[in-house]
Amino acid sequence: LSRAVRVAPRPGRGMGGPFPPPRGDYATLTDTDVAYFRRVLEGSGEDGEGSSGGDVAGDVKPSSISKVRVDAKSLAMANEDWMKKYKGKSKVLLMPSSTAEVSLVLKYCNTRKLAVVPQGGNTGLVGGGVPVHDEVILNLCNLNKIVKVDPSDGVLVAEAGVVLEDLEHAANAHGLCVPLDLGAKGRCQIGGNVSTNAGGLRLVKYGSLRGSVLGLEVVLADGRVLDLLRTLRKDNTGYDLKQLFIGGEGSLGVVTKVAIHAPPAALVANVAFIGVCSFSAAVGAMRLAKQVLGSNLSAFEFLDRTSLTLVLAQLKGTKDPLPSNKSPFYVVVEVTEAGDSAGDGSAGSQTKIKN
């Protein structure tokens, strides 16, 4: 389907070893290519160094100064994942600010046979957002507009580069929430969340993103824009093409806009940290929590004593939540209630958790 937009297998991820796959029969970036990117993204025909101001990739900041980066600092950060496990050798970082610009870039790269790797907040754990070799890096941080918040229908529409935490704040201001919560929410982008089908802490309550995403706008490898940006929760007309791109990691096209269902925000939240004597007891606790708490159960997380000991040793200021209970396993249970059911829900939830 694509020559330009292609996600190569990662070392250790279907590769069976630490060595990257062969580069493939792709073109090599030239000064002429960089000049074209400057012309379509910045309205300039000049070659040369991009702006070195502002961090990129590992901590990308939207920039109006330069959307074509070729300086060493920008490339060093964009070529490496935040855990410093994977490192590419890209010679250019592109930061388009509209769907039209993404389309122009991909159309050109497809014609030139230049490989491309889409990049969001670069917060993943498997290096999917960095080049395997010298692919063109297409970072979407400048597509950062929240298009619509509809509290009546419970729908959010946002560009792919919107940071998850910013989207959550916008939703909260209208009494809604995003059905996804991640530890990296301060940097990860909604387009990357959708492209990796991120699970997150709220999956037990709202299910996977596949069920929450209502529509997408996607740019294909040849530059064509696929408008699947529906906001209907019930749509049984024809093929559900957006599902091809959820979890596709940019291999079939680059997500540029997302429409997502936003449920009512919780008015009451209670969290319990519980020690259990065995793994089977932890599984039993989850089963019991689902039975007793029902739809109010919003998160159920598991950790063992070794993990807790590591956190206490490595992170300053942390304390053992249960210093007198050295259990081999622990579970964290979160209960939330929204709307009228939360009138005196705090006491009710606490009672259920204690019981």
Image (cartoon, rainbow, N blue to C red):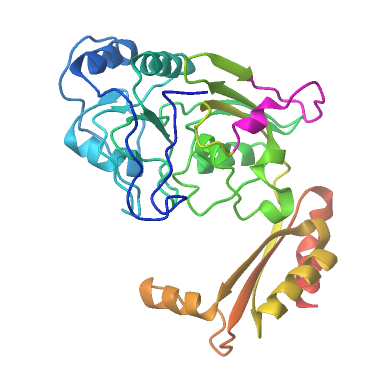
**Along the viewing direction, whichever of 208 and 168 lies nearer the viewer:** 208
Left or right: 160 in relation to 283: left
Front residue of 337/242: it is: 242
Does residue 175 appear in the picture of this structure?
no
* Dominant secondary-structure state across the stretch colored magenta: loop
Q: Which residues are magenta?
A: 228-246
Look at 31% across and 53% down and name the residue there: 84
- Residue 136, x across and y down, in percent: 32, 28
Residue 138, horizontal then vertical, whole percent: 38, 28
Q: Indicate the position of residue 273 as horizontal and vertical percent values.
A: 63, 74
Q: Quadrant of residue 269?
A: bottom right
Say if the magenta span includes residue 232: yes
Which of the 4 quarters of the picture holds residue 7? Answer: top left
Q: As displayed, is residue 92 above or below residue 192?
A: above
Above or below, 334 relative to 243: below
Left or right of residue 271: residue 129:
left
